[in-house]
Image: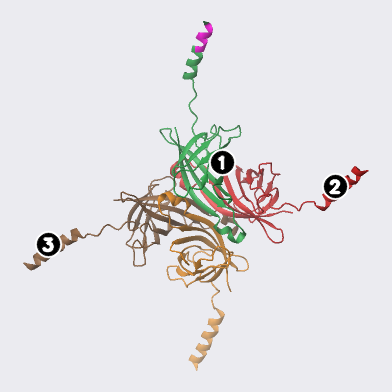
Chain colours: A green, B orange, C brown, D red
């Protein structure tokens, strides 16, 4: 009888004191403005994470496979809108060409608590020689919102 | 007799006070670190110039033809190491694809009077739709020295 | 009598054959995603334009004054979604520091006829020496929609 | 008797066929074209490394302290001129402003066996709001040669 009461009490407390959701932890699922998806793991104690980048239906992505990512972010206990960076090593269908992207960005929270990731990225393919290095890097921006 | 003397004096002065060569006017011929050449016209009164960009032997340039450029620079009477910008509309062999580059840089003069142009550039090709816009832009740097 | 008829006919024709508005001419007024405004002149026969960039209320713009721009675009009679480039020579309050931006982008038209300009830009300030050149350039993207 | 001979033979072979030094492992010490130094650890089995970035005497670096870096590279057993990426979390004197750089590049080996790292980097500082995000990112290139 007593343990039943304890259980109920515990559940009630769990609901009441459920911590405010911590914003701008990158953990979870995100959708980019080009309809790609990104799934990020729980952060480790050093604010590092790993995950996967899933290409979307957008034109020009047809060769891309689900690709691993690794990165880190600022500690959200220290700053409410942390900067972050991560690297994606692209896995491509029918291609031995290595392609790597680095993303550098910041998570912003608006007055409704909605999180948005603003990132600038570089995408590099391997070049055969320094003479061809000039054309190895593309650049662009991506915006991500959380998939709920 | 007097006018003859005046003429000689004038010529002598003209030689003596011939102005120091003004550095960092982009007018003239330049060679890039990737062995491209660039020929820049005399500047007009608003510090605008036009010219041509000539691709070098470097790998990956094979399709490029001599291409027109247009730009402007800061006034070298106001600043010794002027910033500049110019646009190149690439003419390509066997291709109707439009490609445009913008260069943004600064001219530096070292203690020996040698001029070097440091520039960052963006190279864009036309995309078919906003969905393909993400891959339209490449980025890199170029360094130019004057061909004497 | 005859001239009155001619006038009516002319007016009728003017309405009937009013040319389809040509899309993606940059001429006109545009608003950026950071609430800046841009006013672009009529294009000349070489598809060149000039205009002004007016800073918005956004944080960090307080020093900016209305600044002149110059650029060019692909011919809209040849391509429906032209690429473009332009340079802004920033006029700053209380500052003799020269700052220049180059924008490189493309105009897209959606199925409703709405035009959007997608641009990547570089912003450069003058550096004192090649050793300080590394920190002279910022980069970002801007999106513009037409003000009607 | 026979096993002793085998051992001697094995040792002799080990010396003779001592592998050529493997090039383009990022492990070791590097100097950048702006006189910064970078010390990179031995790679782990997944081609990940950590290390430190030490600012040089160049102007504009005065606030920088030795800062940790983390990254990874392509496997040099698969490709002779691997691409790489790494992140530097800058430690700054007298500043709580977080700054992070990502480097994306490739290691090239010339005909003399000299290694050069060509990298493009992004440098980001934290912004207060999305409205200030536009000015958060600088861009540039670095070239590194091995310190022997």
Which-is-in-front pick, marks 2 and 3?
2
Which chain does the residue under circle 2 lie in? D
Q: Do dots 2 and 3 share one subunit?
A: no
Identity of the residue drawn at 57% across and 57% down? C133
* Disc 1: which residue: A69
Q: Give the range drawn in magenta.
A: A2-7
Q: Residue furthest top?
A: A1
Q: Residue C3 location, x and y as percent?
A: 9, 67
Residue B144, quarter of picture: bottom right
Identity of the residue drawn at 60% across and 68% down? B114
* Disc 3: which residue: C8
Which chain does the residue under circle 1 lie in? A
Residue D71, quarter of picture: top right
* Disc 2: which residue: D10
Which-is-in-front pick, marks 3 and 1?
1
State the quadrant of the C terminus of chain A: top left
The residues tagged by marks 2 and 1 sit, at their Cα atoms, a distance apart of: 43 Å
> Relative to B96, does residue C58 appear above or below in the rendering?
above
The residues tagged by marks 3 and 1 sit, at their Cα atoms, a distance apart of: 69 Å
Which-is-in-front pick, marks 2 and 1?
2
Identity of the residue drawn at 88% across and 45% down? D6
Q: Is residue C128 visible?
A: no
Which chain does the residue under circle 3 lie in? C
């Amino acid at each position: 009888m007593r343990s039943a009461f304890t259980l109920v009490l515990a559940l009630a407390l769990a609901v009441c004191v459920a911590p405010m959701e911590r914003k701008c932890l990158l953990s979870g699922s995100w959708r980019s403005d080009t309809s790609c998806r990104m799934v990020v793991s729980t952060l480790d104690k050093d604010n590092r994470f790993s995950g996967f980048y899933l290409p979307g239906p957008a034109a020009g992505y047809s060769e891309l496979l689900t690709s691993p990512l690794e990165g880190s972010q600022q500690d959200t206990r220290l700053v409410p809108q942390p900067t972050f960076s991560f690297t994606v090593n692209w896995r491509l269908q029918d291609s031995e060409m290595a392609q790597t992207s680095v993303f550098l960005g910041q998570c912003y929270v608006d007055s409704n608590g909605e999180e948005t990731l603003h990132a600038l990225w570089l995408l590099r393919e391997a070049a055969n020689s320094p003479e061809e290095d000039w054309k190895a890097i593309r650049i662009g921006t991506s915006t991500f919102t959380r998939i709920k």
